[in-house]
Amino acid sequence: MKSDDQANLAGNGNPRRKFFKKNTAADPDIDDLYKGILEGDRAKLAKAITLIESNASRHFESAQKLLEKLQSERTDSIRIGISGVPGAGKSTFIEAFGTYLCNTGYRVAVLAVDPSSTLSGGSILGDKTRMEELARNPNAFIRPSPTGGTLGGVHRKTRESITICEAAGFDVILVETVGVGQSEAMVREMVDFFLLLVLTGAGDELQGMKKGIMELADAVLVNKADGSNIPFAEKTRAEYNRILHFIQPATTGWETRAYTCSALTLKGIEEFWHVIKRFREACGASGILQERRNNQLKDWMSSLISEQLTNLFYQNRAIQNLLPAVQKEVTAGIKPAAKAVQELFHYFRDAMKD
Amino acid sequence: MKSDDQANLAGNGNPRRKFFKKNTAADPDIDDLYKGILEGDRAKLAKAITLIESNASRHFESAQKLLEKLQSERTDSIRIGISGVPGAGKSTFIEAFGTYLCNTGYRVAVLAVDPSSTLSGGSILGDKTRMEELARNPNAFIRPSPTGGTLGGVHRKTRESITICEAAGFDVILVETVGVGQSEAMVREMVDFFLLLVLTGAGDELQGMKKGIMELADAVLVNKADGSNIPFAEKTRAEYNRILHFIQPATTGWETRAYTCSALTLKGIEEFWHVIKRFREACGASGILQERRNNQLKDWMSSLISEQLTNLFYQNRAIQNLLPAVQKEVTAGIKPAAKAVQELFHYFRDAMKD
């Protein structure tokens, strides 16, 4: 015969257990979210991304469970990163390009990577009114930049949001980058095709352009090629092509070229989509695209591992107790750094045994 | 009474132990090296650096023991990093500048950081004849680039070589970088003052210059300001000053400026040494220099820790057995990366307990 205590431990009829259950009832129902996403329910999709973006550790398990269910729902999506200096017209371009794609029958998701948003209070895509027309289109889904967390954290959130959007049936994923810090390199690591949007007057602009950016691009698109600006845009396109000639292309077997477009007159928008279709055909057939996605996933795993290792070490109590004194010895010139680190790892290994 | 076996375990009269001892007799005598270095024996100094550069793990302990002994011998040295595009005249400048310093009574050590040397087979400073006059000067010590090892490894070797050279009484440590990959950033992290050597014709050259380099510099020095080239050099200097005006200086409280010199006529060489003396006075008095050295040591410790953590994880047998299958699951879209990493860490923690 069970004692009351045993019954409580087993959780049968324990009033406290009921209380806990009630308290976590606010956590989302994974099956419900999963079903909703597959059915194209945008409210559920938004809720799922909010779950992914949560920094609460209790949400991590649910989020991963949901992702695991969605992983098998592969699509033949295309992921396009969009970068450009401020003023290059990223939002007007996304508005025009996204609307064109939606009206052609594609479903388009717009995500953003803004690692600076923790500092600046968030800027890009924070205001959906920047893309009013696209936001109203039933084929479009616009998600503002995730805020909070480390650089790696932002990366994780955006990557996982891509997975969710693809499972939800979106064909084209546009990932906008604000162009601050390492955001372009981060976005390059999660997309198939990387677009650099530029303005006319390449000479002046190149001065302000981050030097590594051109090497990341699969296309350079000169925006605002309209009205009296058309000859300048053409001249700029030619200048970029001349420079691109000397740069190692970002994708093996694909020649990075410069094109023009106008988000105002829409000239060049459809042609740019044909460039991307050609890219997908060429790089899909050669296996380059699948290889890129595989390598991206491996690299991402490596950075998640690095992050975890760093946490494991610096959050270890023995290390936290020792580190300040050891650092002082090193900076005072009493102990060589390599020896200090060797000693710290001696304690770290010991602490890991507990 | 001891049995023979016990005597063997204690190492008394064990013939195998004698054999091992004989085999390690080639290892350097630390006390002898230490004494030699303090006495200014250049052969001993070179031998000590070879010990530091050794990738053999049995040399690590000896090297660290030597470094620990030398750590207390602090000097008021100045560490100068020297960078510049190929053709900017780094070796002729170092020859001229180093010889000037030696003849003024300073002792000058020249080290090199070339992370590419593992790939390219080693180039910079590989041939001492590049700096024939300086190499013959009794006040100079020239050490070719360390070869082999990871990026972090090259960093470690050069940093520790700096410590040894300072203990050996060298006043000025010149660290040359080949300008490949991340070498400038690596050198910036181990020097007090960073010099960017450039040629005339700033406009053209800026195109080829790595974009982040200007932000690392404490001075830009336009070389080859001689003969008919003088007016161009002056124009280039003015152009660089205009650009530097818009760039955050590398050192708080010190204005990065452009200067001219000629390694041929020696004009500007002495003036440049006065710039460095002013820098040391200003930044020494404000405490910026000591703070920089402390931060450099802390950052270096962090990167050594990262390297060790990565080794600990990827060389763990459990992880080595699991990783390929897990990576396959992730790239096949069966398992989300974050969940896969969580699982790997579960096994890693378990394996660390053994």
Image (tube, coloured by chain):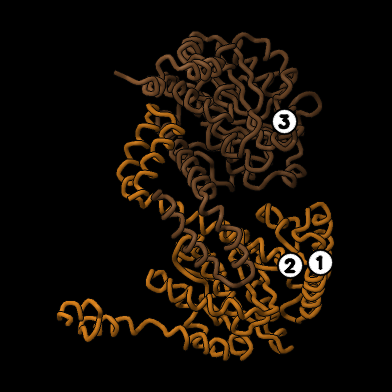
Chain colours: A orange, B brown
- The foreground one among B131 and A334 is A334
Name which residue type carries label 1.
Ser
Q: Are marks 1 and 2 in contact (CB under 8 Å)?
A: yes
Q: x and y percent of residue A258 in the render?
A: 80, 65
Name which residue type carries label 2.
Leu
- The foreground one among B12 and A32 is B12
Compared with B189, A207 (above or below) is below
Q: CA distance from mark 1 to mark 2?
A: 8 Å
The quarter holding residue A107 reads bottom right
Q: x and y percent of residue B250 in the render?
A: 53, 41
Q: Residues within 10 Å of mark 3 (few under 14, many from 20)?
A: some
Q: Residues within 10 Å of mark 2 (few under 14, many from 20)?
A: many
- The foreground one among B318 and A148 is B318
Compared with A310, A131 (above or below) is below
Q: CA distance from mark 2 to mark 3?
A: 35 Å
The chain carrying label 3 is: B
The chain carrying label 1 is: A
Name which residue type carries label 3.
Gly
Q: CA distance from mark 3 to mark 1?
A: 36 Å
Q: x and y percent of residue A295 in the render?
A: 66, 61
Q: Secondary structure at mark 2?
A: helix
Observer able to see residue B262: no
Which mark is on residue A286?
Answer: 1
Discs 1 and 2 share one subunit:
yes
Which mark is on residue B122?
Answer: 3
Task: Give the residue pinned by disc 2.
Answer: A289
Tell us which disc is closer to us: 3 or 1: 1
Compared with B315, A14 (above or below) is below
